[in-house]
Image: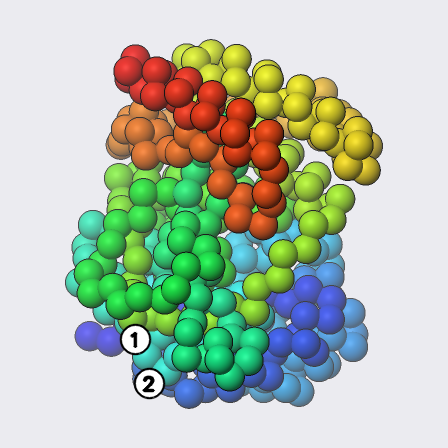
Amino acid sequence: MIKKVGIILVNYKDYAERFLTPCRDSLRAQDYPAEQTRIYIIDNASTPGSLAYLKNNYPEATVLPRLDGNYAAANNLGFKEAIKDGCEYLVTLNMDTEVEPQWLKELVKALDNNPSAGIVQAKILLYPKDEIEKTRAKINSLGNIIHYLGFGFTSDYGAPDREILAYLEIKGYASGCSFIIRREVFEQVGGYIEEFYMYHDDLELSLKVKLAGYKIILAPRAVVYHKYEFKRSTKMIYYMERNRYLTMLIFYPYRFLAWIFLPLLFLDLGMLFYALFGGWFREEIKIYGHFFRRRTYDMIAKERARLKSFSTVPFEEIARDFEGRIMFQEISNPILKYIANPLMNIYWRLVKLFF
């Protein structure tokens, strides 16, 4: 039986004007039955103008307005609407993408053929900038990696595209750029934690899916071209760092936090020093301020209790696949490369002996 699928796109401010048309056209060209496909556009930070633009330019899509720009909440809204409409499989797709005609069919097939998988990520390639790159595609993500101090980063970034024949298991987490999740899995884990707002939202959802006993795999023939741009901003730094701490405080057992306290302390001192000279010291102070609020710890306690209600896999089993080195492809730092990373990696190998 052909599954009914809901595809969620999130617009933010002028995103649709920049990216919607080619993304829409590639979705219209899918070889998956159109009558079994529903498109939902969440107009995040919606205005009357953006709402009208979306409805005029993608009339077959359901457009849902939101005002506050919360990306995690926007995805929750889209997925819940798709579930209400009877969709069995739920897909998230960045608007700054174009997908190959077999993309959706291959995502669905991967879930159908792998009953132990809760999430399937597409093969995400960097969008070619010129004619030469069209014949020499490069990888954006084949699945993402989790560092034991809460960082997340892509695997194989910038490597030449290569043929992959099998459904590879992703040991870290699925990139939120493009993945498919079973409706019952999304409902079981409670969707996204909306406190995350943006960044690390895909990491926290993936961790919950793994704790619930499901695998995350790659669909190598479901190809997405991502118009990826690395833009470092104080807002990005704030949410990435804040959500890194939230990830550890929500997911890590207390004994695990004790094991990693020493490298975490040294790293945070280094981050403070770096922030002082990097122009985002105020954001670091704001992050610490977030963890001096009672409401933050009430939320953490609530989420930790929710994890216990559905977890079937010990956290340590998942943590064995965490990375010991920080690998930010866009940032080259000799102190990180030659001093911090080797020390953190050695420490992590020692910690794993105690699991």
The foreground one among 6 and 241 is 241
Q: Amino acid at mark 2?
A: Asp
Provide the residue designation for mark 2. Answer: 31
Q: Which mark is residue 50?
A: none
| Residue 173 visible in the snapshot | yes
> Dots 2 and 1: beta carbons under 8 Å?
yes
Instruction: Indicate left or right for 111 with 13 as reference.
Output: left
Q: What is the crowding at mark 1: few (fewer than 14 residues within 10 Å), some, or many (at least 20)? A: some
Q: Residue at x 20, y 65 (%)?
A: 165
Instruction: Indicate left or right for 141 with 167 as reference.
Output: right
Secondary structure of the residue carrying tag 2 is: loop
Provide the residue designation for mark 1. Answer: 105
Q: Position of residue 101 (x, y in %)?
A: 37, 82
Whole-angstrom CA distance, mark 2 to mark 1, is 7 Å
Asked if residue 315 is positioned above or below residue 153 in the image, the reply reads above
Q: Quadrant of residue 162?
A: bottom left
Check the picture and name the quadrant holding the C terminus.
Answer: top left
Asked if residue 31 is positioned above or below residue 195 in the image, the reply reads below
Asked if residue 120 is positioned above or below residue 268 in the image, the reply reads below
Check the picture and name the quadrant holding the N terminus.
Answer: bottom left
Instruction: Indicate left or right for 212 with 282 as reference.
Output: left
| Residue 83 visible in the snapshot | no
Q: Position of residue 201 (x, y in %)?
A: 53, 46
Secondary structure of the residue carrying tag 1 is: helix
Q: Position of residue 284 (x, y in %)?
A: 74, 30
Q: What is the crowding at mark 2: few (fewer than 14 residues within 10 Å), some, or many (at least 20)? A: some
Q: Position of residue 210 (x, y in %)?
A: 32, 40
Q: How many marks?
A: 2
